[in-house]
Amino acid sequence: MRNPWIKKNPFMSMWLSGANAVAGSVRGRATAEAKRQATTAVTKGVKQMVNFWSAGLITPPPRKKAKHR
C-alpha cells in the first residue's frame, strides 16, 4: 500500500507556484529599487568629491567695489 502522506497534492502545488511567482516579482522590484538607490548614492558622492577637489582650482569672482557718496 502506498503512503498517502507522500502523494502529490495538486492544490498545494498550485499554491506554491503562485507564491513563488509573487515572491519572484517582489524580489525583482526590490532588486531594481536597490540598484536605483545605489546608483543615486554613487552619483551624489562623485559630484560632491568633484566639487570639493575642484573648488580650490577655480578662483573666486572679483568683488564689486562699494560706491561711496
Image: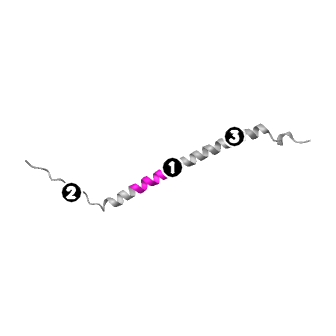
What x and y, as percent, mark residue 34?
Answer: 53, 49
**Residue at disc 3, secondary structure:** helix
Identify the mark nearer the N-term, 1 or 3.
3
Using residue 61 as the reference point, say whether residue 5 is left or right of it.
right
Span highlighted in magenta in the image: 39-47
**Residue at disc 2, secondary structure:** loop
Which residue is pictured at 39% across the width and 55% down the height? 48
Principal secondary structure, stretch drawn in magenta? helix
Identify the mark nearer the N-term, 2 or 3.
3
Q: Which mark is residue 47?
A: none
Q: Residue furthest right?
A: 1
Q: Residue furthest top?
A: 11
Bin the neighbour count of mark 1 within 10 Å (Cα to Cα): few under 14, some 14-19, many 20 and up. few
Q: Which residue is mark 2?
A: 62
Q: Which residue is mark 3?
A: 18
Which residue is pictured at 68% across the width and 43% down the height? 20
Q: Which residue is mark 1?
A: 36
**Residue at disc 1, secondary structure:** helix
Amino acid identity at mark 3: Gly
What x and y, as percent, mark residue 25?
Answer: 62, 44
Amino acid identity at mark 1: Arg
Q: Disc 2 vs disc 1: Cβ atoms closer than 8 Å?
A: no
What x and y, as percent, mark residue 62?
Answer: 21, 57
Identify the mark nearer the N-term, 2 or 1.
1
Q: Residue furthest bottom?
A: 57
Which image quarter: residue 21? top right
Bin the neighbour count of mark 3 within 10 Å (Cα to Cα): few under 14, some 14-19, many 20 and up. few
44 falls in the magenta region:
yes
Q: What distance separates the C-alpha of mark 1 from that of mark 3? A: 27 Å
Amino acid identity at mark 2: Pro
Using residue 50 as the reference point, say whether residue 19 is left or right of it.
right
Which residue is pictured at 76% across the width and 37% down the height? 11
